[in-house]
Image: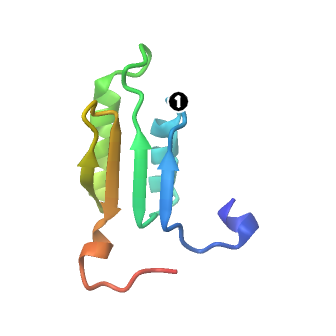
Amino acid sequence: IMQKLQHKQINLLKMDIEGAEYLAIEDMIKKEIKPHQLLIEFHYRFENIGLKATKTAIKNLRKFGFQVFYVSKTGEEVSFISTELLTNKPLQG
């Protein structure tokens, strides 16, 4: 979609994709796509996923340069911000 619309940067990406967020996160990291903010509803309650997959995804996002800035009361919605926004580094895009 980014290529089709000729976008170089995503400012905000919200994921509520019913369990597919885990593969999307892996792909995003692999392709080095780093939105400024990332809002994710994790579906660890799904029988075939579990909490371990969510912990791994959050750990990988932190290594990729994201910091958690909000967690909902249920723990299912987690909001991240790129650590580049918290430093004096110039933003891409």
Occupied quadrant, residue 78: top left
User: Dot 1 lies on which element?
Assistant: loop
Quarter of the picture holding the N terminus: bottom right
Residue flagged by tag 1: what amino acid is it?
A: Glu
* Residue 9 place in picture, x, y as percent: 54, 72
Left or right, 5 with reference to 65: right
Q: How many marks?
A: 1
Left or right, 87 with reference to 6: left
Left or right, 76 with reference to 26: left
Q: To which residue does mark 1 refer?
A: 18
Q: Which residue is the extreme one toward the right? A: 4
In the picture shown, does residue 54 fall above or below 84?
above
- Mark 1, residues whose alpha carbon is within 10 Å: few (<14), some, or many (≥20)? few
Way the structure is coloured: rainbow
Q: Residue at x 28, y 30 (%)?
A: 74
Q: Residue at x 34, y 30 (%)?
A: 53
Q: Nearer the viewer, residue 36 or 70?
A: 70
Q: Is residue 33 visible?
A: no
* Residue 19 place in picture, x, y as percent: 49, 29
Q: Residue at x 25, y 55 (%)?
A: 69
Q: Which residue is the extreme one toward the front? A: 73
Q: Nearer the viewer, residue 92 or 69?
A: 69
Q: Is residue 6 visible?
A: yes
Q: Residue at x 48, y 38 (%)?
A: 21
* Residue 29 place in picture, x, y as percent: 44, 55
